[in-house]
């Protein structure tokens, strides 16, 4: 018996509307990552981009557990000497609440050629 291999033309993408109000950040990001990868589908193939579109509403109302609200810090580097930057969770949530969810989801997706296309299907309202 042959193994079924889905074709790129056969992929049907659905739209999922997720309300982030009161949800915990990590659990929400995990659910979104699964939907973007298409792991919930019967015909899932890891080498194809099978995922659906995900629209997140109320991104600013997402919660974190423990004392992360005060203590969590996001780091990045510009590539230049002395270019190490850090931003507190509370400040980032006040200025760009969608970026918190984007970073969490991006870090839960596999780091390969498909990640950019999967992240492009994540939208915010």
Image (spheres, rainbow, N blue to C red):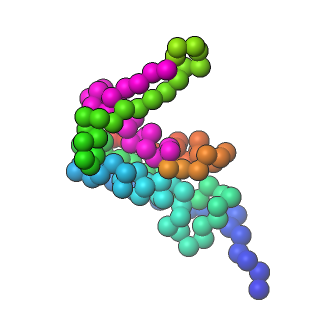
Q: Among all residues in the image, which is located at the extreme bottom?
A: 1
Q: Give the residue drawn at x 40%, y 51%.
A: 29
Range of residues picked out in magenta? 84-107
Q: Within the image, what quadrant is residue 60 found in?
A: top left
Residue at x-position 77% and y-position 86%: 1
Q: Is residue 79 above or below residue 41?
A: above
Q: Within the image, what quadrant is residue 30 found in?
A: bottom left
Q: Is residue 59 above or below residue 76?
A: below
Q: Main secondary structure of the magenta part?
A: helix
In this view, which residue lies farthest toward the right?
2
Q: Which of 78 and 7 lies nearest the eye of the viewer? A: 78
In magenta stretch: residue 12: no
Q: Find residue 73 and report its horizontal and vertical position in percent.
A: 37, 32
Q: Position of residue 20 (x, y in %)?
A: 29, 49
Which residue is at a point 52% across and 14% down the rendered structure image?
Answer: 82
Q: Is residue 56 above or below residue 92?
A: below
Rendered location of residue 116, percent (x, y): 59, 41
Q: How many marks?
A: 0
Identify which residue is drawn at 54% across, 20% down.
Answer: 78
Magenta span includes 94? yes
From the viewer's side, name the closer residue of 39 and 25.
25
> Which quadrant, please, contains the C terminus?
top left
Residue 123 visible within the image? no
Residue 30 vs residue 117: left or right?
left
Relative image position of residue 16 (x, y in whole percent): 40, 56
Q: Is residue 123 left or right of residue 97?
A: right
């Amino acid at each position: 018996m042959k193994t079924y291999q889905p074709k790129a033309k056969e992929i049907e993408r659905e739209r999922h509307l997720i309300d982030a109000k009161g949800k915990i950040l990590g659990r929400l990001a995990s659910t979104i990552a699964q939907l973007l990868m298409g792991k919930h589908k019967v015909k899932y193939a890891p080498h194809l981009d099978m995922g659906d579109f995900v629209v997140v509403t109320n991104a600013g109302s997402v919660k974190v557990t423990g004392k992360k609200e005060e203590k969590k810090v996001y780091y990045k580097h510009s590539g230049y000497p002395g270019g190490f930057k850090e931003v507190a969770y509370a400040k980032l949530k006040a200025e760009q609440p969608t970026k918190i969810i984007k970073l969490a989801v991006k870090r839960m997706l596999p780091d390969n050629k498909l990640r950019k296309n999967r992240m492009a299907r994540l939208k915010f309202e």
